[in-house]
Image (tube, rainbow, N blue to C red):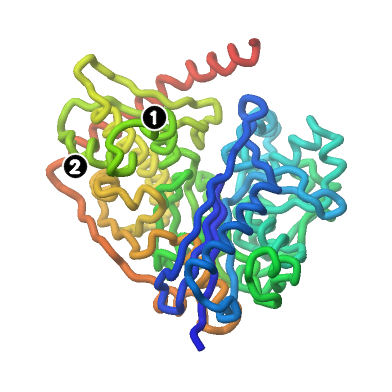
């Protein structure tokens, strides 16, 4: 009898279901796009009932397209975007879903910075607060939406909500809870002093039990089996923070290996045996029972291209090709050594400044959309480079990266990454590394694989390799310096814009 693993990947909008065999081959894929709402400036939310309905849809579609007996699915793993806040009410019903693009917590973060709250949290979780971090959002709700806060029964992360709907159990995993700054990093557990530092002394009972990512969280319920076509009783593991899942699903599982994800977020991460204790590092997550991921990230990556396509390219152009293919062709038509504007990819703020805004600089009348798209591709890669330089300064040395995420699918962006970062870049065989990483965790959880490395060896492979082009190294070095200088020059202007918006 054949054995298959179902991997789910729930991003900020899209949810995917992919069925894999034990060699990592994809039998079927189903995708459903959800909707974000922005009820106020800086607020980015989603309807949790819609998310669950979309999950039901893609699971059922995936099984049907694969044409297999659902009884041959031996386990299910789920990955989901980190941070944000997904809450159930006290009766276990969906209450609110806040996405990791949300910036409502900027004011609280600024206030906490003045009160040195970050020093207190860092002592426990090796992180400082930021706007869309789960405890920051919980503190915001406590202060500004007390009635909703009083209704909260459980604080989840995105994939925890899906696991809960599948199994009826209440759980989370170490990768997500450490990644959002709610675990004491040394012992990988909740701690009263850490919650107190956030002003969340009364929230311990809202946090679900913490499992290892590959631990079995529960089993598919009879009701869910009837809705999806899954077999009741199928084991579901606790799952993974999606950036960790993407690293595993691209074959990055060994100490010193580096993963770059060009998705909605710019993710730049390296596996270490010990947690890096350097306050300049944005985020740490536990990788398995003994290792860690040092993560430098911000919402500054391929979300910029998605916005350009959605607003300006989706409803026109060549009907025979996707708008993303068109973008890559246009970028390839522009010489990297030519006259190209500078782009800041700060549609959702920058890691260093939640009030930062995106912008093109140096546009002239002879520039075309190809030049602007080239600037966008480069600007995203420049911000990845800034993150990677932070990792290097903290002692996380590596000389090769594996690229995944939507940006890795481009015919030209991986080469730009190699040229800008100055290191060889490998693109993994699977385009769905998040779901594949979740599937590897599921296979590990039920004993098919001895550990993540064994699972990755069985289910992942490299597809393309790119080496830096020495001829453009100086060009990119100059443009990267200019990128940073404009960033510094614009900082006071962004503060003025934010102040003006606050008064209107």
Residue nearest the observer in this picture, 441 or 285: 441
How busy is the neighbourhood of tag 2: few (under 14 within 10 Å), some, or many (20 plus)? some
- Distance from disc 1 to disc 2, alpha carbons, whole Å, reads 20 Å
Disc nearest the viewer among 1 and 2? 1
Q: Earlier in the sequence, mark 1 or mark 2?
A: 1
- Hey, which residue is sitting farthest left in the picture? 471
Q: Quadrant of residue 119?
A: top right
Q: Is residue 78 left or right of residue 47?
A: left
Q: Is residue 168 left or right of residue 21?
A: right
Q: Which mark is residue 269?
A: none
Examine the rendering and report whether any part of residue 324 can be seen: yes
Horizontal and vertical percent position of residue 127: 61, 48
Element type where label 1 sits in the image = strand
Horizontal and vertical percent position of residue 314: 39, 34
Residue drawn at x 39%, y 29% as measured from the top left: 344
Residue drawn at x 52%, y 30% as measured from the top left: 353
Q: Quadrant of residue 133?
A: top right
Examine the rendering and report whether any part of residue 256 can be seen: no
- Is 486 placed above or below 181 here? above
Element type where label 2 sits in the image = helix
How busy is the neighbourhood of tag 1: few (under 14 within 10 Å), some, or many (20 plus)? many
Identify the image quadrant of the C terminus: top right
State the residue position of label 2.
473
Q: Is residue 18 left or right of residue 366?
A: right
- Hey, which residue is sitting farthest bottom in the picture? 1
Q: Quadrant of residue 167?
A: bottom right
Horizontal and vertical percent position of residue 428: 34, 63
Residue drawn at x 75%, y 71% as measured from the top left: 222
Residue nearest the observer in this picture, 461 or 296: 461
State the residue position of label 1.
344
């Amino acid at each position: 009898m054949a054995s298959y693993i179902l991997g789910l990947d729930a991003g900020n909008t899209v949810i995917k279901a992919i069925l894999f065999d034990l060699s990592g081959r994809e039998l079927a894929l189903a995708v459903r796009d959800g909707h974000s709402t922005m009820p106020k400036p800086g607020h980015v939310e989603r309807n949790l009932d819609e998310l669950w309905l979309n999950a039901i849809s893609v699971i059922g579609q995936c099984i049907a397209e694969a044409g297999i007996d659902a009884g041959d699915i031996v386990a299910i793993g789920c990955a989901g975007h980190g941070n944000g806040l997904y809450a159930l009410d006290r009766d276990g019903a969906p209450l609110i879903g806040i996405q990791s693009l949300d910036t409502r917590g900027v004011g609280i973060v600024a206030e906490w910075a003045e009160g040195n709250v970050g020093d207190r949290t860092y002592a426990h979780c090796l992180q400082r607060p930021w706007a869309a971090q789960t405890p920051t959002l919980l503190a915001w709700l406590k202060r500004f939406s007390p009635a909703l806060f009083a209704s909260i029964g459980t604080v989840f992360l995105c994939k925890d909500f899906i696991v809960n709907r599948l199994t009826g159990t209440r759980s989370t995993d170490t990768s997500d809870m450490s990644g959002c700054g709610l675990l004491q990093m040394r012992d990988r557990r909740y701690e009263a002093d850490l919650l107190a530092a956030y002003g969340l002394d009364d929230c311990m009972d809202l946090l679900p039990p913490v499992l290892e990512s590959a631990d079995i969280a529960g089993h598919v319920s009879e009701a869910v089996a009837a809705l999806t076509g899954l077999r009741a009783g199928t084991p579901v593991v606790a799952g993974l923070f999606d950036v960790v899942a993407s690293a595993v699903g691209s074959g990055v599982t060994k100490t010193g290996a580096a993963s770059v994800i060009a998705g909605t977020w710019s993710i730049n991460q390296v596996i270490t045996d010990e947690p890096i204790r350097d306050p300049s590092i944005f985020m740490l997550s536990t990788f398995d029972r003994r290792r860690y991921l040092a993560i430098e990230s911000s919402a500054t990556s391929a979300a910029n291209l998605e916005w350009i396509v959605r607003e300006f390219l989706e409803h026109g152009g060549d009907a025979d090709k996707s708008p993303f293919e068109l973008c890559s062709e246009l970028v390839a038509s522009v010489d990297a050594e030519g006259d190209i504007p500078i782009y800041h990819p700060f549609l959702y703020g920058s890691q260093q400044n939640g009030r930062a805004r995106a912008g093109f600089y140096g546009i002239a009348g002879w520039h075309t959309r190809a030049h602007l798209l080239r600037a966008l591709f480069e600007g995203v890669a420049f911000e990845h480079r800034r993150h990677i330089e932070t990792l290097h300064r903290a002692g996380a040395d590596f000389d090769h990266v594996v690229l995944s995420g939507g940006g890795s699918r481009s015919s030209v962006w991986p080469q730009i990454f190699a040229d800008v970062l100055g290191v060889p870049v490998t693109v993994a065989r699977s385009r769905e590394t998040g779901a594949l990483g979740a599937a590897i965790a599921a296979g590990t959880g039920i004993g098919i694989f001895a550990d993540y490395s064994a699972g990755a060896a069985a289910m992942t492979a490299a597809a393309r390799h790119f080496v830096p082009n020495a001829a453009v190294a100086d060009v990119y070095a100059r443009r990267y310096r200019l990128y940073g200088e404009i960033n510094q020059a614009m900082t006071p202007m962004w503060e003025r814009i934010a102040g003006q918006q606050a008064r209107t």
